[in-house]
Amino acid sequence: MSLIIILDPINKVLGGHGLPLLTTPIVCGTAALCVVSLPFTSSLVHPKSSVRLRNIWFVVNRICSAFGLLQTVPNKAKLLAIHEQVIDEEREAFNDNIGCEESKREIFTIQLNGVDEKGNMFTPLGRYIFSVDMMLRLKRRLRFAKYVNSLPPSTLNQPSSVEVNAPIVIVGLPRTGSTMISRLLSADPNSRSPLYWEFAHDSDDVSPADPAKANLDYRAKPVDDGFAKLSLFSPNGLAEFFKFHKVGATEHEEITGFSRRYFYDMETALLSPEAQRKRLEWQASSNVDRSFLATHLAVWFRLQPRARGGEYWVIKSPAYTAWLPELAAAFPNARFVFTSRDPKSVLPSLCGLNEVASSIKFNYRNGRDLAPLGEGVVGRISGYAKQQEMFIKDQPEKCLALSYREMVKEPLTCVNEIYKHAGKEFTKEIEACMKAHMDNNKKGKHGKAVYSLDKFQLSEKMIEEEFAGYQQFL
């Protein structure tokens, strides 16, 4: 039997009065007709949340659940097929070996199965969005690999005009000030940082941007349009997100935009316990070949032209943690900066960020608490902390640790330490540029996020025990 649904957003078909209304299905032969009256009002995704979604979102999800629609990832076979195309094309572009290819398949499968796992908090439309988003990411990878394959072999062998081999890499755990310090470094006219749209654009043109016109590139607009469309379902979601992390097509963006081509939807594992466990095992396993991540990233860097006199790269992302040794091998002269913060502040802040970012995909209503999200975040970040601690012990000469307190209190003093660590000169001119950046980007400019441990059923004692080894970096 087929199902025909008529959506009535202006409440005229059934004379709705601000409440979603589903009529009794009318069965005509092999078809069932439903008319749904949908309001434009919005409601909280959870009693303790400040994020609001359109009621249309909840109604459509209930309809899908009632009729058994979108209970698994749509187009799963197509996703698997295009993923194999991507692997074939990347084999030619990046000389990936069999181990790399198996590693890609494994992490891809973890994410796909995580969305379908019974008991997780994905909504039906969340699965649909996941499928669409996954397809877009695969197509981006495919376009980039095809572009690399179209270049003359000599292109990748020529010396780059930007110093690729000695970047400053900002790592640390999420919500520890890594964004603040990386964007401060990006204010240096001699630095070069990727822009959000350079990783996120959906254009067929994946060629490097003209550095002098990167902020005006036509490929940036569709990315900002995509952010604007969030208001269709989440009228205040983007504003809430900005309280945690400012995003935009021409913002200096962390490398997550690139690494997520391989990790995909990180939130999947946060609310799917089995997927979370398997992904953590994947990240920590000594048998997994993660070298493809650094190889692909290094190729992207080498293709970029000089930017505003840029002499070195500033790249940032907590997602590096899963492949720090591979990154150090790909960039032998890189210098790593590890930001740190009290985990009792990190965990609720990151949970709040994930709640806002994934509110459209997940169901926080109907009496369900936010404990699964908290558990997922703790598991992932605990693994990150252990891996960062191990890397610092193995390669201390490449690493500099900075605390959140120091960065907030004396940001320029911390920058001076970074420059010394990287063997670069911190001039008065650079300092002036950074002061101007700080004046234009005051803390709390986009509002202040409110978060707590209780909201995600986390306790201080549990965090102290789980992150005992991490405390030495504070």
Image (tube, rainbow, N blue to C red):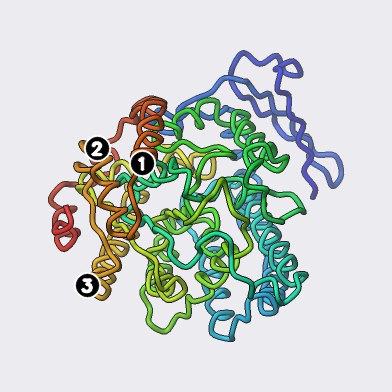
Q: Earlier in the sequence, mark 3 or mark 1?
A: 1
Of pointers 3 and 2, the one earlier in the residue sequence: 3
Residue that numbered label 1 is attached to:
180
The spot of residue 459 in percent (x, y) is: 18, 47
Q: Residue at x 74, y 15 (%)?
A: 12
Of the image marks 1 and 2, the number of the one nearer the N terminus? 1
- Decide which of 305, 459 is in the foreground and name it: 305
Label 1 Cα crowd, 10 Å radius (few <14 / some 14-19 / many 20+): some
Between 448 and 327, the one nearer to me in the picture: 327
Count the marks: how many? Answer: 3
The answer to whether the residue labelled 1 contacts the one labelled 2, judged by CB atoms less than 8 Å apart, is yes
Name the residue at 46% across, 53% down: 267
**Residue 142: % across, % down:** 71, 65
Q: Residue at coordinates 67% horizontally, 74% vertically from top-left?
A: 90
* Secondary structure at numbered mark 2: helix
Q: Measure how far apart labels 3 and 1 are at the Cα level.
A: 25 Å
From the image, tell me which residue sits under label 3.
393
User: In what element is the residue under mark 1?
Assistant: helix
The CA distance from mark 3 to mark 2 is 26 Å
Amino acid marked by disc 1: Met
